[in-house]
Image (spheres, rainbow, N blue to C red):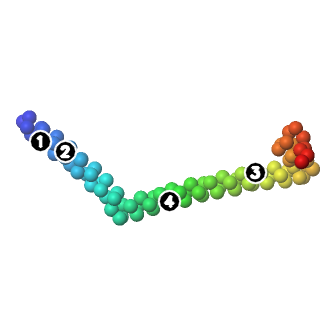
Amino acid sequence: MRRLLWLGIGLAVGALVVRAITKKAQAFTPQGIAASARDSAAGIAGSVRDFVADVRDGMAEREAEIQAAFADGSTLDDDLYPEGPQHR
């Protein structure tokens, strides 16, 4: 009975190892490399899209600040140079 238990455990571990090795080997086939590249490209494209959206939001916010300052007749230099205008 004990031998059957160890035989079963050995078969289960062996099957898990073979499955893991097969999965790793699949990553190095042309199809696996193409899938990895496709996933990486999709991730990069998503990151670029998020970055562009953040830049657009920042630009719109800054444009609103500039338009509000222009409508009030105030300058934005006070925000940039709190110590006063700089002479060069």
Q: Disc 2 marks which residue?
A: 12
Residue 16: numbered disc: none
Q: Residue at x 33, y 62 (%)?
A: 29
Labels 3 & 2 near each other (Cβ < 8 A): no
Q: Disc 3 marks which residue?
A: 61
Q: Nearer the viewer, mark 2 or mark 4?
A: 4
Query: Looking at the image, is mark 3 or mark 2 earlier in the sequence?
Result: 2
Q: Amino acid at mark 1?
A: Leu
Query: Looking at the image, is mark 3 or mark 1 earlier in the sequence?
Result: 1
Most extreme residue toward the top is 2
Query: Looking at the image, is mark 1 or mark 4 earlier in the sequence?
Result: 1
Image spot of residue 3 (x, y percent): 8, 37
Position of 4 with respect to 59 (left or right) is left
9 w.r.t. 38: above or below: above
Q: Amino acid at mark 2?
A: Ala
Q: Residue at x 80, y 52 (%)?
A: 64
Label 3, label 1: how many angstroms apart (C-alpha)?
68 Å
Q: Disc 4 marks which residue?
A: 42
Query: Looking at the image, is mark 1 or mark 2 earlier in the sequence?
Result: 1
Image spot of residue 45 (x, y percent): 55, 59
Q: Residue at x 86, y 47 (%)?
A: 76
Q: Amino acid at mark 4?
A: Ala
Label 3, label 4: how many angstroms apart (C-alpha)?
29 Å
Q: Disc 1 marks which residue?
A: 7
